[in-house]
Amino acid sequence: MSVEAPPNLKVDLADASRRLESASAWDILRWSVETFGPKLTMATAFGPEGCAILHMLSHVDPDHQVRVFNLDTGYQFPETLRLRDRIAERYGIEVELVGADTTVAQFEAANGGPVYSKEPDRCCFERKIVPLRRAVVGYDAWISSIRADQSADRARADVVGWDAKFDLVKVNPLLRWSRRDVWAFVVANAIPYNPLHDQGYPSIGCWPCTRAVAEGETDERAGRWAGQAKTECGLHSLDSSQL
Ligand code: SF4
């Protein structure tokens, strides 16, 4: 993610990125809420990282001025959708479901069946990227839950930088955290998490494109688009050809 941004941006991103690089996730979140206020938004797929950030956000943003949304592709696991309710009960944060402009039935009927099996990049584009672009109109910045050690693309991200793909500042509070750090925080704070993680799913996306990992598989994203070259839905990749 580049720190180059439009010249009229009110924040010096290069300076913020430098200062926040070694800051705690709490301080990064606090800075982003103070800097962007209601012009800050967050997308979450309810992974453990996202749930950890929501826990922090409930303290840092007690008035819920930050709008949080989930890209509801229509293909999410029921466990994921139930987690949304558990988050609302625990934190009072109502995560908005942002869907595509067609139902799954309409989408599949228009395309002669499921698109995820034949053209997963197009499926992700239409069910995730297009709704995300629409959801962030009018916002100045968004929070994501990526960690640098999840993929090569994510390793190139900055804690704070310009996201040219969506024309927003992107804030990654957990960028320097490890998977172990995340789970230690989740457990220590009894944060609600997706029960599928206890059933062999380290990373959870849509049900057609997610499988449990086998014993001995060390790549936590091995169960995502298994057997395909695809590794990202396109939200966090730097390579626009993945769209
Ligand atoms: Fe479609 Fe699979 Fe992408 Fe979900 S993860 S939007 S089902 S291709």
Image (cartoon, helix red, strand yellow):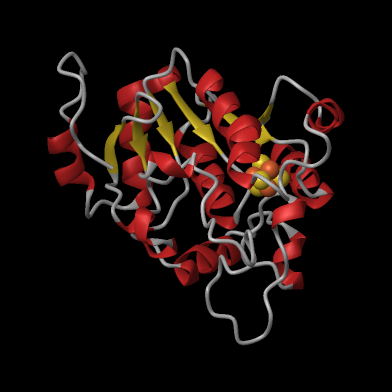
Judged from this view, the residue extending furthest toward the bottom is 216
Q: Residue at x 52, y 30 (%)?
A: 62
**To which quarter of the image does residue 28 belong?**
top left
Residue 108 vs residue 55: left or right? right
Q: Is residue 216 above or below residue 79?
A: below
Q: Quadrant of the N terminus?
A: top left
Q: Residue at x 58, y 41 (%)?
A: 44
**To which quarter of the image does residue 168 belong?**
top left
> Where is residue 112 shown, x and y percent of the image?
83, 35
Q: Is residue 118 above or below residue 183?
A: above
Residue 134 vs residue 74: left or right? left
Q: Do we see residue 93 in this rendering?
A: no
> Where is residue 3 shown, x and y percent of the image?
20, 36
Q: Residue 136 or 131: which is nearer the viewer?
A: 131
> Where is residue 213 shown, x and y percent of the image?
67, 74
Q: Residue at x 80, y 52 (%)?
A: 79
Q: Residue at x 40, y 39 (%)?
A: 240
> Where is residue 14 shown, x and y percent of the image?
14, 37
Residue 199 vs residue 183: left or right? right
Q: Which quarter of the frame holds ligand 1?
A: top right
